[in-house]
Image (tube, coloured by chain):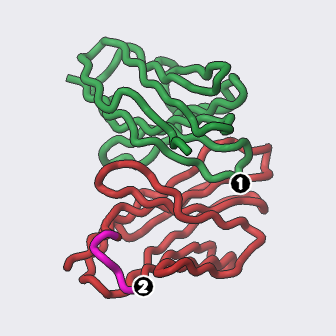
Chain colours: A green, B red
């Protein structure tokens, strides 16, 4: 069974540009989560999508947005990139429910120059 | 407020030593779930175990064991006879279940970096 896949592996952008990160969940999972892992800040929750709807978002500005497609894949968009957006962005998927373990992809390393 | 604390930032042991990683959590929910994840140098987070708030039985899986104690709000993880391949960052996480419905997200501790030297 294929795990969570994320693309691209690495992404290099400059300040002010926009970035799009993609995630394909494990087959059968309807929930997709996005986390940011920045150096020294640990894993911070960004967004949760389930059945095509945004269900919750973390404490991030509106320039972080995303969507979930009918096939449950998801993309994360970051507009007006800032230097502090440099981080590993992890996508996870699960069956819906707080008791369900989230399974993570390998992440996208976003570097802002 | 919900919170997960992993007080040990880094631990270094020699192979075959036993090591315990501490995790203390805070939540106002009566239904919640606790998780441990492993993040090797390659970066991906690997799910290790889930515990629900109603099940305080300890669990053992090979060299890994987990001790859940509601009285002290702790969910500690022990690796017996550690190996070099155990070197990774280990994260403890909390998911709340019943207060206002699931928020979906995992609340992670800061992680403990374990280095096992040969």
Residue at left offset 41%, top offset 60%: B111
Q: Which mark is residue A99?
A: 1
Q: Nearer the viewer, residue A4 or A19?
A: A4
Main secondary structure type of the part rendered in magenta:
loop
Q: Which mark is residue B12?
A: none
Element type at mark 2: loop
Residue A65 in percent (x, y) is at 52, 20
Q: Which residue is mark 2?
A: B80
Residue at point 51%, 43% (across, down) = A3
Does residue A41 appear anywhere in the picture?
yes
Q: Quadrant of the C terminus of chain A?
A: top left
User: What chain is tagged by disc 1?
Assistant: A
> Where is residue A72, by image quadrant?
top right
* Magenta residue span: B80-85
Q: Is residue A24 above or below residue A45?
A: above
Classify B17 as above or below A60. below
Name which residue lies at 73% across and 46% down. Answer: A97
In space, the residues marked 2 and 1 are separated at their CA atoms by: 27 Å
Chain designation of label 2: B
Looking at the image, residue A52 sits to the left or right of residue A76; the answer is right
Q: Position of residue B44 (x, y in %)?
A: 40, 49
User: Is residue B83 on the magenta stretch?
Assistant: yes
Q: At 42% from the left edge and 57% from the top edge, which residue is drawn? A: B110
- Residue A101 painted magenta: no
Dividing the picture into quarters, in which one does residue A96 lie? top right
């Amino acid at each position: 069974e294929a795990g969570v896949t994320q693309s691209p592996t690495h992404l290099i952008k400059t300040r002010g540009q926009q970035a799009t990160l993609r995630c394909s969940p494990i087959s059968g999972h309807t929930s997709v989560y996005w986390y940011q892992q920045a150096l020294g800040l640990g894993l911070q929750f960004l967004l949760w999508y389930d059945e095509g709807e945004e269900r919750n978002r973390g404490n991030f500005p509106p320039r972080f947005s995303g969507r979930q497609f009918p096939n449950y894949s998801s993309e994360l968009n970051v507009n007006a990139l800032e230097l502090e957006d440099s981080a590993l962005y992890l996508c996870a998927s699960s069956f819906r429910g707080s008791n369900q373990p989230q399974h993570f992809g390998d992440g996208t390393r976003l570097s802002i120059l | 407020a919900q919170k997960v604390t992993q007080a040990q930032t880094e631990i270094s042991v020699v192979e075959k030593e036993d090591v315990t990683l501490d995790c203390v959590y805070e939540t106002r929910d009566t239904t919640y779930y606790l998780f441990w994840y492993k993040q090797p140098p390659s970066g991906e987070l690997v799910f290790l175990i889930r515990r629900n708030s109603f099940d305080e039985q300890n669990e053992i899986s090979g060299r890994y064991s987990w001790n859940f104690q509601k009285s002290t709000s702790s969910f500690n993880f022990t690796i017996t006879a550690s190996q070099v391949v155990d070197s990774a960052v280990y994260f403890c996480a909390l998911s709340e279940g019943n207060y206002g419905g699931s928020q979906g997200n995992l609340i992670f501790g800061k992680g403990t970096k374990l280095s096992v030297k040969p």
